[in-house]
Image: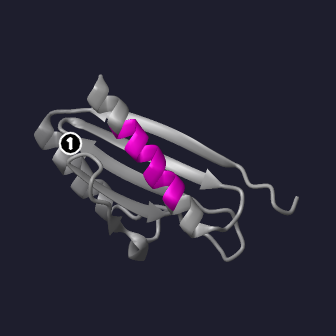
Amino acid sequence: MQGTNRSNVHLRPFRLTVDLAREDMREDRTDASGWEKDTVEDVPGIGDEAFLRFRKTVPGAPVSAQLCFRRSNMVVWLTYARSDDDRQAARAGAVDAAREAAARLRSG
């Protein structure tokens, strides 16, 4: 249906030691299984470190953006999926959802 877009947010948090959390972020950033290597970008202001990437897709297919962030010893992977191919909207949705998740983690 034209003009109707749906988005889904999937959140997976993991608690580790700080050193293991840092290592997990480094490994996940370089693991391109199903994700585009050339779209990885740092996202400042979310947790202690954060990056965003897009799932491999074909033009015109639905798009998913994943934002991974670390706050101390916790690693959070947030995937934001849309029913259309609007990459900018997927990026914005992932960043907004990650900012909200990080704020809730800070508030306890």
Q: Which part of the image, by quadrant, shows the C terminus?
A: top left
Specify the color scheme. one colour
* Residue 100 lies in the magenta-colored region: yes
Q: Residue furthest right?
A: 1
Residue at x 40% of width, y 37% of height: 101
Q: State which region is magenta.
A: 92-102
Query: Would you call the spot at circle 1 few (<14 residues within 10 Å), some (14-19), or many (20 or more)?
Result: many
* Left or right: 13, with 4 as reference point: left
Q: x and y percent of residue 106 in the render?
A: 27, 31
Q: Residue at 37%, 68% (x, y): give it.
A: 40
Q: Is 22 left, or right, of 14 in this rendering? A: left
Task: From the top left corner, tell me how far across and down residue 77 is, in percent.
Answer: 40, 45
Q: Is residue 96 above or below residue 55?
A: above
The residue shown at (47%, 38%) is: 11
Residue closer to the observer: 28 or 91: 91
The reply, left or right, for residue 23 in relation to residue 58 is: left
Quadrant including the N terminus? bottom right
* Helix, strand or loop at mark 1: helix
Q: Which residue is mark 1?
A: 21
Q: Quadrant of residue 38?
A: bottom left
The residue lying furthest to the left in this view is: 19
The mark total stands at 1
- In the rendered image, residue 17 lying in the magenta stretch gets the answer no
Residue type marked 1:
Ala
The percent position of residue 83, horizontal first and vertical second, equals: 71, 56
Whether residue 62 is situated above or below residue 50 in the rendered picture: below
Residue 46: image x %, image y %?
30, 49
What's the residue at 53%, 40% (across, down)? 10
Residue 100 higher or lower than 54, as above or below: above
Magenta part, dominant SS: helix
Can you tell which quarter of the image residue 12 is in? top left
